[in-house]
Image (cartoon, coloured by chain):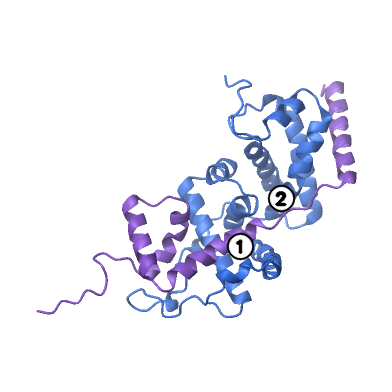
Amino acid sequence: MIRLWFRPRRGMVCREAVELVTDYLEGALSQAQRRRFEAHLAGCPDCPEYLAQIRAVIALAGTITPDDLTPRMRGEFIRLYRRWQADEERGPQ
Amino acid sequence: MAGDLAVPEDPDSGLVSRLRAGDESAFAELAGKYQGAMLSMARVYVPSGAVAEEVVQDAWVGVLRGIGRFERRSSFRTWLFRILVNRAISAGTRERRSVPVDDMGPVVDASCFDAGGTWQVPPAPWADQVDDQVIAAKIAARILAAIDELPLQQREVVTLRDVQGLSGEEVCAVLGISNGNQRVLLHRGRSKLRQVIGSEFGRSR
């Protein structure tokens, strides 16, 4: 009798794997799910690239740096602080 | 009753203590550290740069008013972003609490998979190309525009997590959402950014 084992039992398919990528990266998968996910990745020619792309997106987003504070802005914050303090001392009533 | 017991890992703890003691330079230092992040976060809610600046200024005044009552149950950063988000929402011209019902499908188009769920149009490879700094700098500029096109809730979470670098726990505290919700929004947002970057490389679906 010929039995064909195309995939391990209850193996994960790509369509499922891509939906679990974030939970995987967040450490939010159960141990069993994580094992299934990693087993799929180990045997899949394409999903590792998908995961790598998501990781690349995260890394790229992290490179967006807001502008540094200029000396002029520093002066503005000191003025804001003093104005607030003066208002406080005057009191609301 | 937490009093002055600081969250031990809060890197801003020293500056917060100085600010509470009335040290104006501590305020300038905190502002210097967070102004850029505050502005980019404000722009998540208000499209105009001028309005965003007003919102941020308003939030800083809120910090000065509230710092005496800040109990350090969260990090300063979490508390700061919460103030900002509240101000931005009340100034907000963009709708916040709408549930994106139109956006609950699979994150990768169903046509990319065969009937069994295996890739039939696999992602064209580009991930290793972003190691090239020149390419990365070019793509990073595009990613900012792509984030701006995300639905608001995804934009909030992606900006806080991936641009500002907050932890999942912090994001939940800032936005008042559950961790599960946070992960779903992050997942959808990141998936869309992947698509945009992929098409930027010209070959991916």
Position of residue B42 relative to residue A20, above or below, is: above
Q: For the N terminus of chain A, which image quadrant?
A: bottom left
Chain-order first, disc 2 or disc 1 = 2
Position of A82 relative to B180 (above/below): above
Picture layout, residue B15 above or below residue A60? above
Q: Nearer the viewer, residue B133 or B8?
A: B133
- Along the horizontal axis of the image, is B26 left or right of A30? right
Q: Is residue B175 left or right of residue B64?
A: left
Residue found at the very far left of the displayed protein: A1
- Name the side, left or right, on which B12 lies relative to B176: right
Q: Secondary structure at mark 2?
A: helix
Residue B50: give its label. none
Residue B41 in percent (x, y) is at: 69, 50
Circle 2 chain: B
The quarter of the displayed image where residue A55 is located? bottom right
Inter-mark Cα distance, 2 to 1: 15 Å
* Percent position of residue A87, x then y: 86, 27
**In which chain is the residue bearing label 1?**
B
Specify the amino acid type for callout 1. Leu
Q: Quadrant of residue A5?
A: bottom left
Chain A palette colour: purple
Disc 1 on helix, strand or loop? loop
Inspect this view and state whether residue B102 appears.
Answer: no
Q: What residue is pinned by disc 2?
A: B42
Q: Type of residue at label 2?
A: Ala
The disc placed on residue B150 is 1
> Which residue is at 50% across, 59% downward?
B187
Tell me which chain appears blue.
B
